[in-house]
Amino acid sequence: MMGTSILGLAWRSLMNRRGSALLTILAVALSVALFLGVDKARNGARAGFDNTISGTDLIVGAPTGQINLLLYSVFRLGNATAEVSWDTYQQVAARGDIAWTIPVSLGDSHRGFRVMGTDQSYFEHYKYGDGQPLRLSEGERFGDIYQAVIGAGVARELGYEIGGEIVLTHGLGAGGLTDHDNRPFIVAGILAPTGTPVDQTIHIPLEGMTAIHVGWESGTKNPMADTITEEMIRSFDLTPRSITAIFVGLERRGTILSTQRAINTRPGEPLLAIIPGVALGELWQVTGVVERALIAVSVFVIAVGLVSVLTSILTSLNERRREMSILRATGARPGHIFFLMVAEAGLLGFIGAVLGVALVQLGLVLLGPVLSQTYGVQLQGLGVSFTDLWTVLAVTGAALVIGMIPAITALRRSLADGLTVKL
Amino acid sequence: MTDTPAIKIRDLGFAWPQSPPLLDIAGFDLARGEKLFLRGPSGSGKSTLLGLVAGVLEPQSGTIEVLGENMTGLAGSKRDRLRADRMGVIFQMFNLVPYLSVVQNVMLPCRFSAARRKAAGDDLAGEARRLLARLGLSDEKLLARPVTDLSVGQQQRVAVARALIGGPQLLIADEPTSALDADARDRFIELLTEEASGSGAALLFVSHDGSLASHFDRSVDLAEINRARATA
Ligand SMILES: Nc1ncnc2c1ncn2[C@@H]1O[C@H](COP(=O)(O)OP(=O)(O)OP(=O)(O)O)[C@@H](O)[C@H]1O
Ligand SMILES: [Mg+2]
């Protein structure tokens, strides 16, 4: 009875100071929303990265850092500093413990989207999420050297349809002088959305990649390049001289470590073979420092929110001296006064935290579709998570503890004032 | 048990911290059901004495028995419980908790005392309304208003209803009429003494205004019983 009855008093007292109580609740809510928002973004990013590649046992490239190789080959972030020669690729692909390989050649772009040269094995073996294969939503795989298969994000953002023409840009430039405008590509297929960087990629055959670079051997466009005719190009051997990376699937996953070691230590052209999961793990270790800093900052912001709870109750105490002595006179024990103050703090903290959770959920509902459409990021955690509950509990608990400060002040005063309060 | 006095004070000594002795009372009694007027000028220690009787303050020496219980022998929490269960207190002004409705203010003691809650019956709000009606506050529109909108006289009557709920045996009133005009004051005291008689409660009413003494069974001047002041 005492519990619910004092809680009722605390509630009415807060409602009586609605304005300041609301501001305090808002401060707590925003701080909690920031904390949970950071947490959800962090988990969303991790889940997004973890979902991007699946089923590929090893990624092989020229020697560099393993995070670097992972980032540029899978996430299209950054650039390769060196390539793997076609001969070496053939040797790796021929290994008995390897079931399949996907050659990947990166370097060009189209209006900000990366272009990736590959072959049919990409559509057969590349998997994402928990093993989902790529699926065409429209059209078909590329057949001719001047055909392209574009990701769902590319199609949506650039409004491309089957049969449309694409002029690629040499390197990652903005277009213009470095355009491969003499060799446009035709959109043959559009991939279904995956929520991974595949959505933002334009896929062309390796031969097409070679073909548009005829006349570009020096790195810039040879003035004679435009005089080379279509027939001449098609008569050339369009096998690339080098590629950027190789995705590898093994016959038996059990050999993963020995195959990795064998590739890394093979004689001849030096190679780096990485296990995607291991490289991701290392990446999270690096980003973990930043994440922890962000979390620490948002925890401090919550602390600021809690201080506003303290301030709001402490400043109310002076004008409530009279109220305290009335409560004492009508039978409130010091414990009641103490509990009343603590309950007010707890209510402010609890309502603020719940509102914060609600704000984040609302944000997810409103922003989630935009994010997943624009960036292919699947924000998850809609619906109340364990972290949400835990946060509400912790914030309420901390508010209760902080509430003891005004509670002790009020208690002392009410004992010293007796029944007589000088106003 | 009911033949013990409502209040029995012996050799009471009290001083506020860092102050000379304020109260030194050899003996003072209030019988059950008696309505006593305690007079004394401002600053003479009337409110302090009420605080001692209510058990909110502790004397440095002597004994105070309230309704048969020796307050000076009781722990603070027991004194609080005795006040909650068996006393009703009315202040000079600002008696009401601003964020509670009129009826909730009247029911307030029942939040802190199971005994008062039980004595008031199952329908607490109904009992509160009955008491308010007896004190002339039955207009539903008035009862629905925030307590801070009520006139001082109305607020004081709400305070009386609150002191009476659950039938406490001792009522303590600290200058409840000082903010009222003469007419309202007389009506208020009549109501208060009537209700005290009706419920059989003893009433200790303090004021500096000696002209009110005629409404009570007995009148005492604090200066007569307080030796500390006499020597000061
Ligand atoms: N909480 C307190 N702390 C310290 N001294 C106090 C306290 N309350 C009252 N006093 C002192 O005790 C003395 C008596 O005060 P008290 O309020 O009991 O007088 P009173 O007779 O009720 O006066 P009034 O008619 O003005 O209400 C005064 O000198 C006052 O300054
Ligand atoms: Mg006084």
Image (cartoon, coloured by chain):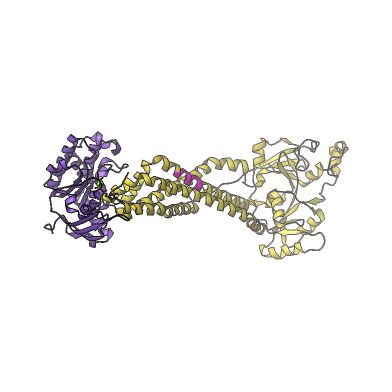
Chain colours: A yellow, B purple
Which residue is at a point 32% across and 53% down the rendered structure image?
A416
Residue A164 on image: x %, y %? 71, 35
Left or right of B60 in this view: B210 = left
Which residue is at a point 41% across and 50% down the rendered structure image?
A345
* Residue B23 or residue B230, whichever sits in front: B230
The quarter holding residue B60 reads bottom left
The outermost residue toward the front is: B231
Read off the magenta span. Answer: A24-31
Which residue is at a point 84% across and 47% down the rendered structure image?
A237
Residue A194 on image: x %, y %? 62, 46
Left or right of B28 in this view: A113 = right
**How many marks do you count on the picture?**
0
Left or right of A183 in this view: A367 = left
Left or right of A237 in this view: B28 = left
Q: Quadrant of the N terminus of chain B?
A: bottom left
Residue A143 on image: x %, y %? 74, 43
What's the magenta bit mostly, secondary-structure-wise?
Answer: helix
* Residue A149 or residue A298, whichever sits in front: A298
* The magenta stretch spans residue A398: no
Q: Is residue B114 visible?
A: no
Q: Is residue A237 visible?
A: yes
* Residue A245 or residue A278, whichever sits in front: A278
Residue A204 on image: x %, y %? 74, 44
The quarter holding residue A69 reads bottom right
